[in-house]
Image: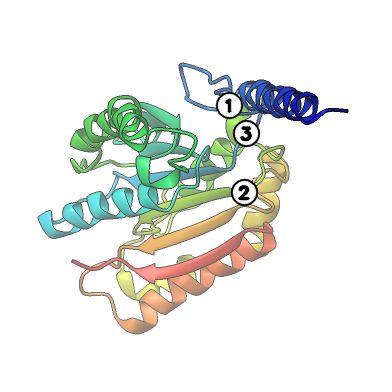
């Protein structure tokens, strides 16, 4: 075969390879299909982080600022495609969806490979579709309200029965800001005297059985990150007794838990 023929054949092979690569890239790297309501990938159940603010408590301005910072901190650690929802235990003792905010992280400009997507466009989309709705929800989330009921454990259990947060969802996490003062038909920590706190805390195994009797084992496997709003004037012993009680309840329900005091 003559030299010109070899060069021509080589060029044909190169062109075919380039066209094949372009076709492959168009097929593989094309944008995936998103649900416009949630920004989640269609056909995929994402990991889900839910931040619950117990608004049956009254927060100081400093604590309200810390709540806002906690929301933004949770936002910043979201993986691409991970879902984030905001809920509040409201003044009626009901778990409500704050501004119906429940979106998947569509990715920020800094989270993507600039070889395949334009970071500026990605960030602009993120700001318009995710960040602005989050800021609107935040405006109401940190306004404290007083309430006569605080069904904490029942609210968490009901949350795990939602389709987007049931046992079929991998990576379920609840970030809870609360004083952990249960007050419902199940039981109440309130009484005539603060000193008898330990006498008003029922057997954790009894509470766990009652919760499972009503809600099943939906809480099992959930990770709960508790930001404990300690009551002013309570002794270290009282705070420790309340935390020990909840740790035992969560442990019996199969909940993975972590605690930190929420001061301000």
Q: Which mark is residue 52?
A: none
- Is 93 situated left or right of 50 in this image? left
Disc 2 secondary structure class? loop
Mark 3 or 2 closer to N-term?
A: 3
As measured in the structure, the alpha-carbon distance from the residue carrying label 3 to the one carrying label 2 is: 15 Å
Q: Residues within 10 Å of mark 3 (few under 14, many from 20)?
A: some
Q: Which of label 3 and label 2 is nearer to you?
A: 2
User: Which badge, 2 or 1, comes first in the chain's sequence?
Assistant: 1
- Please give the residue where the numbered disc 2 appears in the rendered image: 171
Q: Is residue 198 above or below residue 65?
A: below
Mark 1 element type: loop
| Residue at mark 1 | 41
Q: Where is residue 95 drawn, in percent x and y?
A: 42, 34
Q: Which residue is denoted by mark 3 in the rendering? A: 161
Badge 1, how many Cα within 10 Å: few under 14, some, many 20+? some
Instruction: Give the residue at x 39% y 30%.
Output: 96
């Amino acid at each position: 075969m003559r030299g010109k023929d070899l060069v021509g054949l080589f060029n044909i092979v190169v062109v075919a390879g380039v066209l094949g690569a372009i076709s492959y890239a168009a097929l593989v790297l094309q944008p995936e299909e998103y649900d416009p309501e949630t920004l989640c990938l269609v056909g995929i159940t994402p990991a889900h982080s839910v931040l619950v603010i117990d608004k049956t408590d009254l927060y100081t301005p400093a604590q309200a600022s810390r709540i806002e910072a906690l929301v933004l901190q949770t936002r910043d650690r979201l993986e691409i495609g991970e879902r984030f929802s905001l809920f509040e235990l409201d003044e009626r003792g009901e778990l409500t969806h704050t501004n119906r905010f429940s979106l998947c992280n569509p990715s920020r400009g800094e989270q993507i490979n600039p070889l395949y997507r334009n970071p500026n466009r990605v960030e602009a989309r993120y700001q318009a579709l995710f960040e602005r709705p989050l800021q609107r929800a935040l405006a109401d989330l940190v306004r404290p309200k007083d309430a006569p009921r605080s069904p904490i454990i029942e609210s968490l259990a009901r949350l795990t029965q939602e389709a987007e947060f049931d046992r079929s969802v991998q990576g379920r996490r609840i970030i809870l800001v609360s004083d952990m003062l249960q007050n419902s038909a199940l039981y109440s920590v309130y009484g005539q005297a603060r000193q008898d706190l330990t006498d008003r805390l029922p057997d954790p195994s009894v509470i766990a059985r009652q919760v499972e009797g009503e809600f099943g084992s939906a809480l099992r496997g959930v990770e709960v990150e508790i930001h404990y709003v300690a009551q002013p004037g309570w002794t270290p012993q009282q705070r420790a007794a309340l935390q020990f009680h909840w740790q035992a309840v969560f442990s019996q329900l199969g909940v993975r838990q972590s605690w930190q005091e929420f001061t301000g």
